[in-house]
Amino acid sequence: MYSHHKIVDLRGNVNTRLSKLHSNKDWNAAIFAKAGLDRIGLLSQLRGNYGFEYSDLDSFVPAPAQGAMMITAMGDNTAVLEAVSKLNDAQTQLCVDIERRFLRELEGGCTAPIGAIAQVIDNQINFKGCLLSIDGKERIDVQDQITLDKVNNDRGLAFAKAQSEKVFANGGKAMMQSIKTALNS
């Protein structure tokens, strides 16, 4: 999408990265998680204190389950399982299950360029998914929705599988094979 840009790593905490962006005259922009900037109170300060402008990058589909928190417990510890179950949000769990199943069906791991986001909006799950080639020049997108009442007892997994099958039907199998070959070499 932005093949004319040069992308470089930007490491450090948020303040360090903002300082690097401000002091490096060769850089025109940096990408930050909006939710993270807002959570630490910096989003509202970007324009004023730092003199930066910002815009949402809705075309970027995050990694599956990005930002989801998980608690793990021993399966036979019913007291702990019951306690942590009260923290779980069923709709978030459903969305994470769909995103992770999409990833699993594409047979992608944590290094494969796969994006997925499922969101519940007005009693409907809106899903966006994508598979990109290693160089980012090829992209296969899927977008679909399903009403919550149509998600059966499989936690949306059939819906996620249907989305991955759309990717495969549009050249995704060959693209995944080239990704696996590149990652294993």
Image: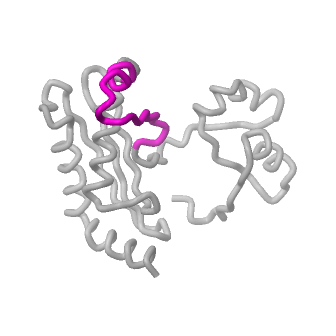
Residue 31 locus on image (x, y percent): 64, 47
Q: Is residue 185 above or below residue 56?
A: below
Q: Position of residue 116 (x, y in %)?
A: 37, 46
Asked if the stretch drawn in magenta spans residue 148, the answer is no
> Which residue appears at 61% of the width and 65% of the height?
4
Quarter of image, res 98: top left
Whether residue 69 sits left or right of residue 19 in the image: it is left
Give 175 or 103, whichever is nearer the viewer: 103
Q: Is residue 31 left or right of residue 45?
A: left
Percent position of residue 115, x then y:
41, 51
Q: In the rendered picture of this protein, how many numbered marks are placed on residues?
A: 0
Work out whether 47 lies above or below 182.
Answer: above
Give the residue displayed 68% in from the left and 62% down from the top.
8
Q: How is the image coloured?
A: one colour
Tell which of 91 and 70 is nearer to you.
Answer: 70
Residue for point 32% across, 74% down: 177
Q: Quadrant of residue 148?
A: top left
Note whether 145 is above or below 112 in the view shown.
above
Q: Residue furthest bottom?
A: 185
Looking at the image, which is closer to me, 149 or 54?
A: 149
| Majority SS type along the magenta span | loop
Q: Is residue 78 magenta?
A: yes
Residue 133 x %, y %: 42, 68
Q: Which residues are magenta?
A: 65-84
Report the residue at 38% width, 19% height from top. 83
